[in-house]
Amino acid sequence: MKNIRNFSIIAHIDHGKSTLADRMIQHCNMVSDRDFKNQLLDSMDIERERGITIKSQTICLPYKAKDGQDYILNLVDTPGHVDFSYEVSRALTSCEGALLLIDAAQGVEAQTLANLYLAMENDLEIIPVINKIDLPAAEPEAVALQIEDDLGLDIDQTVMCSAKTGKGVDEILEAIVKYLPPPEGDSTAPLQALIFDANYDAFRGTIISCRIMQGEVRAGEVITFMATGATYKVEEVGLFHLKRSPQKKLSAGQVGYILAGVKTVNDTSPGDTITHKDNPCSAPLPGFKEVQQVVFSSLYPITTDEYENLATAMEKLKLNDAALTFQKDSSSALGFGFRCGFLGLLHLEVIQERLEREFNIPLILTVPSVNFHFHLNDGTMVEVDNPAYFPDPGSIQRTEEPFIKATILIPERYMGSVMTLCMERRGENTSYHYPTPGRIEFTCELPLGEVIYDFYDKLKSITQGYGSFDYSLLDYRPSDLVKLDILVNGEGVDALSQLTHRSKARERGLHACDRLKEEIPRQMFKIAIQAAIGGNIVARTNISALRKDVTAKCYGGDISRKRKLLEKQKAGKKRMKTVGNVDIPQSAFLAVLKSDQN
């Protein structure tokens, strides 16, 4: 056990985490030059294109150190985005140390701090690594001072590297062996293993990624999941090389996989504890909690005959993504679809893109919403994430919405515009300090409903890409929530309804009306597009009627002849308006979602 090192790489998005993992794999001769490809641990096309890690991977690296001993380095790769912070925390629990990767040109950013605090909560040994020292804009000495001043880490342990060129990778591997402690655990004790991830294999079922804390596990033994109480017979255990490598047993201190005929990923939960059925451990490992969805949206196929294909696709995605929840939903405007829960906006975008790419199903999404609490006059509390289930306004005693604590790191010249943005989004309890000269760490408490629309895009725009953003959920607070309905020609369009704060209702209503006016084609009669709260119209715009010149053939004679024709046309348009239907094109729904709220 003394020659095992379990570690993770934590970093802000795009600081070179996947590239460094590639160089380590190459350095340990795990892959031939012919088989190598960039972002080796990122299996999805979306991960490669966007340069983000969505699904964490694990790999076991054999390494011969300069002291002549052979070591096993278990790299537990983690997602980099704030949406997947619970998965990151479980992966860190399975390690003894972490490499804190920092870009030499960008310096310490918001998620660098957030991930560092997560690692410190788990008592991990931290090795600071400054990456991208080959860039012309790199300032490794200044970043090293930031690491010492802001983060309080030992500057003597800092390793400089360039993951792209491979410079400094040998020093990083030596630092892992030298500074990170070996795992602790008793292989003779009852089995206690932490699940930190799970993947689905179409032939073998769920592949459970776990860290053995105590005891041993072999094929043929019967295991129990302590959170769910489910029991399974182990079919195979092994280590993660680039391909799965079966072993006779997994012992305390090792990171590997268990195959036990688990049907879906949904049957396993990150943070759950595995133990033997006949000889269970005394208590489960601490820190387990159910994954909470925070953003909700409905997905509808553009053509109704694609519904069956969408249902099949959702079931297949669910096999691989336990955090996705969905239930059947229907809309008078869009037909049948699914109401889905997501970990955040990135998770929503990834699911939408996977459905469109992997299953070739074009989709329409309704306005994303969060989970609101409505306390009614009879003393009950209902949770509502869909405007269709908005309670009767007369029965509502008070409403509450979720708040987050946002941490924003920016150059100080953008302070005024960022503060204005936060105030526009109903921010409160703002505070800031200067971690280093020229940079500000700005914290603010914001309603989650204001952040999920376009806050991150706006932040990146006003800070010219230099702003970094991280958040954590706080609590629910009283709020004045209303249901905003969109009416087209007097008919409500349920797919465009949204729950919003009363102070933002007119702004959102005007925005929706303007976008619909651009997208809905003109008819032979005037169309009114309105935004309403209950019976009160808060915004309105009109689509003027197409006009046919009925007096073109009427030349000469008395004016009353022309007036008679115009009156006849007016009566016809009035009758047409009462019986005419307005078809809303699919592009109108997308336009309302995708454009900015200013």
Image: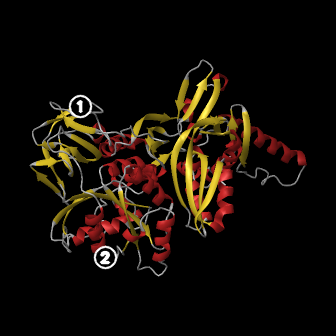
Kind of residue at badge 2: Gly
- Which is more toward the observer, 473 or 353? 473
- Residue type at the position of mark 1: Ala
Rendered image: mark on residue 230:
1
Residue 226 position in % (x across, y down): 27, 33
Few, some or many residues within 10 Å of mark 2 (<14, 14–19, 20+): some
- Outermost residue toward the top in this view: 378
CA distance for labels 2 and 1? 46 Å
**Residue 571 visible in image:** yes
- Spot occupied by residue 441 in the image (x, y as percentages of width and height): 58, 60
Disc number placed over residue 323 in the picture, else none: none
Report the quarter where the C terminus lies: bottom right
Q: Number of callouts in the render? A: 2
Q: In front: 10, or 358? A: 10
Q: Residues within 10 Å of mark 1 (few under 14, many from 20)?
A: some
Apparent side of residue 193 relative to residue 567 in the rendered image (left or right): left
Residue 22 rendering spot, x and y as whole percentages = 29, 68
The quarter of the picture where the N terminus appears is: bottom left
Q: Residue at x 50, y 47 (%)?
A: 472
Q: Is residue 518 left or right of residue 363?
A: right
Compare marks 2 and 1 and give the one earlier in the sequence. 2
Where in the figure is residue 366, as x and y percent of width and height? 52, 44
Foreground residue among 213 and 487? 213
Q: Quadrant of residue 480?
A: top right
Which residue is denoted by mark 2 in the rendering? 166
**What SS does tag 2 mark?**
loop
45 over 285 or under it: above or below: below
